[in-house]
Image (cartoon, coloured by chain):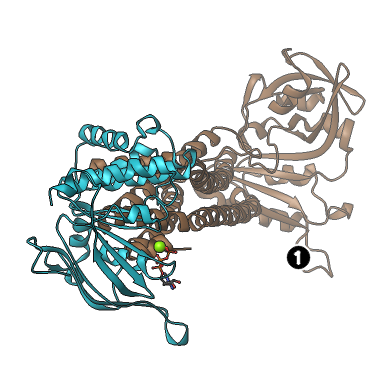
Chain colours: A brown, B cyan
Amino acid sequence: MTVTETIRFALRGVAANKLRSALTMLGILIGVAAVILLVAVGNGSAQAITSRIEALGTNTLTVTSTNRSSGTGGLTVEVADALADPVLAPGVRSVSPLASTSTTVTYEGADHEVSQFVGTRPSWFTAANSPVADGAAFTADDEAQAHRVVVIGQTVADELFTGVDPIGRQVTVGGALFTVVGVLAAKSSTGFQDANDTAVAPLSAVREVLTGYGPISSILVEAADPGEVDAVQDQISAVLAQRLPTTTGSSSAPYRIQNAAQLLQTQTETADTFTTLLGAVAAISLLVGGIGITNIMLVTVTERTREIGIRKALGARRRTVLTQFLIEATLLSLLGGALGVAAALLGSRFTIVGVRPVIVPSSVALALGVSIAIGLFFGGLPAARAARLRPIDALRYE
Amino acid sequence: MQPRTSPRRPVLDVRALTKVYGEGPAAVHALGGVSLTVDAGDYVAIMGSSGSGKSTLMNIIGCLDVPSGGSYLLDGVDVGRLADRQLALVRNRLIGFVFQAFNLIPRTSAVANVELPLAYAGVRAAQRRRRALAALDAVGLADRAGHFPNQLSGGQQQRVAVARALVTEPALVLADEPTGNLDSRSTEDILAVFDQLNAAGRTIVLITHEPEVGDRARRLIRLLDGRVRSDERQDLTGRHAAGAAR
Ligand SMILES: Nc1ncnc2c1ncn2[C@@H]1O[C@H](COP(=O)(O)OP(=O)(O)OP(=O)(O)O)[C@@H](O)[C@H]1O
Ligand SMILES: [Mg+2]
């Protein structure tokens, strides 16, 4: 019997048992698609965090207060201004004090809870790497005069202004009217927190309307050069140590200095946990798919063994029978695997739990390899065993 | 066995064949030393009560099973020495086997079932189809070619099985109760096919419980408890031309 003939027999075998073939392929499809997609989601969220670290810039430092409750040890605008000292801290390019809170923004009856309503200075836009996409940032003059103007994030713009240009509109924040002067360029999200759900206004205006004149939340320090970040960190800790001495009885300083990478370290760790979790789920689904295939194959062993007995009795050689059944198993696994990859590629075009999945090529190879191995093994093993039996024993198999 | 009166060489030569199923006290001695020879072109019927070892003997003759003891020569070749490859060739080219339980491949059409042995013989698809349809026609099932086994009656399935055994035009046709499920008319059709094959010089060995089927054969072997009880040539008065030529 020729090879093409054997392949035709295998095809006929696949077609003759449609339900079994479909179930086998479905098992492989789900296993492969789940592994590829879940790994892609994990990878996507990790990449989003990396890009956020890069977007935030590698030349910034953030100073946060560690005991915000005690008013005396808190960060103030005066402390921030002291950091912009060309003599003591020559590596500093800009200093942006931040007062941030969450508040409700209202526009013509529509309201939206902004998770990060930030009051700062114009230098923040470059330091935080958050350019304005539409309109303009507020100016130093706006800050000095405490003008009530605001630059909103993409999410806020979408929530409040559907089909309307937000520039020039007036929104109500904390009982006061703010004029929208710009919209920030959209940022990629990590999936845990919406980076676009924010609004930025002059520090003086925010303190006046929302936070009051107490301690500020944090200070964003921009170094003149990314290579100087460590030097700048030393310079500002020296200034801060002078300004905010460690209180007696407390072993640590009342503030903490972190660079961008450190800031996002925790988030990266969370993302890693997330990826591991997804990987485990994927492995389980591959296992379940494998068990499904095994089950289907085992259930049909009796019938297939009898069929092999008949074929051998009619003069089929062991090798011919084996080849046919292996081709059948390969075909089902390959087809199921290919459909699984296709499903995963299709699925990865959508955002899943706020993450754009990024396919990892090695996961495709792994998922395909494992599922095809399962299909071949459990499809081929009973066939190999049955082909070795005497025809009469195969025919009597129960 | 009358070696003197038979001018033909034996196609089957069975010597002191035994078959034991299982071991120890539960062992079943299905065959207890069967010896017989069948000449080429003969027509042999094997009868005997249920469990007397007829199917067991037939399976060994058909190279589907191996004996526990004794030897078996097919066309002068000791089958026990053949490798899987050669056995496959023997089963395919030399023997046409009709099973007691039909053994059609499920979810595969009647004609595809009949084509199988031809496929393993390497016959081309077009010719295969033609010969398979002719074989189905010979057993009166030309109009059921596309049906699946589960769409056929027991008797029809049996006739498909007969067609499958005949399609390769084997020198030796072995049939385990080929008319067990058929009415008298279908039985007559099948027997007519066997008569034709025998007239064409093919050797036929069939198992039956029906005396009228046994009467059609030239030789009747009776088994009892795994041994040959009687082996006699039959008077073939009333048989057609094939018998008269003898
Ligand atoms: N695979 C087997 N394992 C154990 N015993 C078996 C097996 N096959 C047959 N036997 C036993 O061997 C004996 C002969 O069986 P066989 O099938 O040859 O009978 P038979 O003459 O064909 O009967 P029937 O007319 O009912 O078909 C029986 O006693 C049966 O129980
Ligand atoms: Mg029997």
Left or right: A23 as drawn, with respect to A166: left
**A243 vs A61, nearest the viewer:** A61
Up/down of A188 relative to A300, above or below: above
In percent of width and height, residue B195 lies at 24, 46
The amino acid type of the residue labelled 1 equals Ser
Q: Secondary structure at mark 1?
A: loop
Up/down of A109 relative to B4, above or below: above
Up/down of B14 relative to A341, above or below: below
Up/down of B40 relative to B161, above or below: below
Chain letter behind tag 1: A
- Ligand 1 occupies quarter: bottom left
Left or right: A133 as drawn, with respect to A147: left
In percent of width and height, residue B151 lies at 48, 38
Q: Measuring 39% from the left and 53% from the top, which residue is drawn there?
A: A307
**A341 vs A350, nearest the viewer:** A341
Is residue A119 visible in the rendered image? The answer is yes
In percent of width and height, residue B154 lies at 47, 45
Quadrant in which residue A252 is drawn? bottom right
**Residue placed furthest toward the front:** B237
Badge 1 crowding class, 10 Å Cα cut-off, few under 14, some 14 to 19, many 20 or more, is few
Quadrant in which residue A148 is drawn? top right
Q: Measuring 75% from the left and 61% from the top, which residue is drawn there?
A: A253
Left or right: A360 as drawn, with respect to A247: left
User: Which residue is labeled 1 in the image?
Assistant: A252
Q: Indicate if the residue with disc 1 has its beta carbon within 8 Å of ligand 1.
A: no
Quadrant in which residue B164 is drawn? top left
Q: Measuring 67% from the left and 34% from the top, which residue is drawn there?
A: A124
In percent of width and height, residue B173 lies at 25, 53
